Image (cartoon, rainbow, N blue to C red):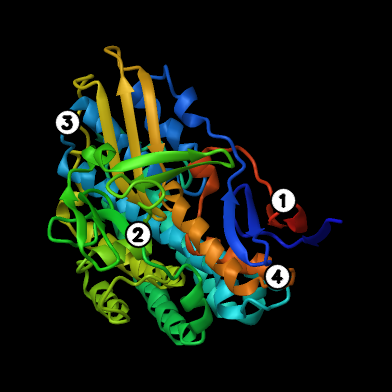
Amino acid sequence: MTKTITIDPVTRIEGHGKVTIYLDDNGTVNDARFHVTQIRGFEKFCEGRPFHEMPSITARICGICPVSHLIASSKACDDILAVKIPETGAKLRRLLNLAQFVQSHALSFFYLSSPDLFLGMKTKKEMRNIFGILEAYPALAKDGIKLRKFGQQIIEKIAGKRIHPPWVVPGGVTDPLTLEKRDEILNTIPEAKDIIRKTLDRYKKENIKLLEENESYGDFSTNYLGLTSKNLGLELYDGFLSIIDSNRKFIIDRINPRSYKDHIGEAVEPWSYLKFPYYKGEGYPKGIYRVGPLARLNLVTHCGTPEADIELEEFKSMNKKPIEGNFHTHYARLIEILFGIEKIEDILNDPEVTSNRIRAYAGVNKLEGIGVSEAPRGTLIHHYKVNEEGNITWVNLIIATAHNNLAMNKAILQVAQRYIKGLEVPKNILNRVEAVIRTFDPCLSCSTHAISKMPLQIQLVSSRGKIIHEMRRI
């Protein structure tokens, strides 16, 4: 008889998710699958739309990451226009993207993952949320709210709206940054820097206690993919595409991102709507790689801002090879927040940032456009084809969560093999599985373009296909 265990707190995973864990004849876990049960759609219903509408349309994929889609989409449209946007337009896009990084990383770290980090995996389910953090560590919770507010307010000040701003367009941006708004943002930077410094210090002290998680939550060898600058600096808006292996050897060394299809393949499985990108040089599924904060810091030699460079050096000192444990992604997020705040300050202090030269105008000069940038969760690819009238005929989107799909499945398997022994299923296994998924900060609505939410479900299946245990979030 099937035994059902229902666990009812909020999941803290964005979107639809189901995990199935398979046992062999001896009751040992031999496979685990992360099913994304949402259906895709944006690639198809964008067909026929004028290409210049694409930034605003694709921003609606998600309310958490609209800026990331605005950036990648606008770059693909720039490619169709065959223009180089004015320097100030590029700087303002960078500014918006950095603000998105700060607010999104703050959301992931403080709102979604801090209960795992500071309250522990065995904390009562009623406490495993932001309200539990507010009760146990009120200053930490308030700092998280302030830091996310910092990023969101920058987006609102320069782009007009916090969510789905229409400010980023093909060829640049619509409105310049005023001196008044520039000064308003500069005045908020000292407090934001103070918060991230305190949070980094707190996390590094707490991380010493997380030995079990650091060693078994996605701690395995993969390749790492992302954008870098020409001199291997941290680059979130533009740059060159690279892949390194688990020995830090370059498999692909700083190539033009427009050639991504020569190196990245996309597989599908019948049990998930989320695609499985892979490195073509190693085939599927061997060509597993990771993207996101951990991958980016493994790829680069420096960040390019004073305080973030110091933190990066300390981060890399943990291992001469790439840092492989995915639980360290939380640490990497904090370093990227610090980098983002420092870089925002640098851009705002550039006298050219308030120039009126912010947009280039042109018609359809190419029938294909590719835009690649870094989103908080990892490398984001928008690829469009148009007809002579500029109407979309074909779209391909590779979202960061999709890039990480193979790695997420492997990480779930690792956690399941550690904590499930035979038919004994720990009561907190669902939270442990969620915790390893949260290290990737998946945005399932982005990656599959769904319109609603559904709980996480875990099934334990015997070698004969019988469901032994089922756990479900309501």
Amino acid type at mark 3: Val
Horizontally, is 201 left or right of 272 in the view? left
Query: Which secondary structure lies at badge 1?
Result: loop
Residue type at the position of mark 1 = Gly
Q: Which mark is residue 83?
A: 3
Disc on res. 422: 4
Where does residue 302 sit, x and y in percent of width and height?
A: 20, 69
Secondary structure of the residue carrying tag 2 is helix
Cα separation, mark 2 vs mark 1, equals 61 Å
Q: Which mark is residue 383?
A: none
Specify the label residue 184 is tagged with: 2
User: Comparing marks 3 and 4, which lies closer to the viewer?
Assistant: 4
At a point 28% along the width and 30% down the height, the residue shown is 77
Tell me the distance, in whole angstroms, between the alpha carbons under discs 2 and 3. 32 Å
The front one of 204 and 458 is 458
Question: For numbered disc 4, what is the local secondary structure?
Answer: loop
N-term mark: 3 or 1: 3
Ranked by sequence position, the earlier of labels 2 and 4 is 2
Q: From the top left corner, tell me how far across and down residue 103 is, in percent.
A: 44, 59
> How many residues crowd mark 1 within 10 Å: few (<14), some (14–19), many (20+)?
few
Which of the two labelled residues, at mark 1 and mark 4, occupies the earlier sequence position? 4
- Closer to us: mark 2 or mark 1? 1
Q: CA distance from mark 1 to mark 4?
A: 15 Å
List the residue tagged with mark 1: 465
Judge the density around disc 2: few (<14), some (14-19), many (≥20) Cα neighbours within 10 Å.
Answer: few
Amino acid type of the residue that numbered disc 2 sits on in the rendered structure: Glu
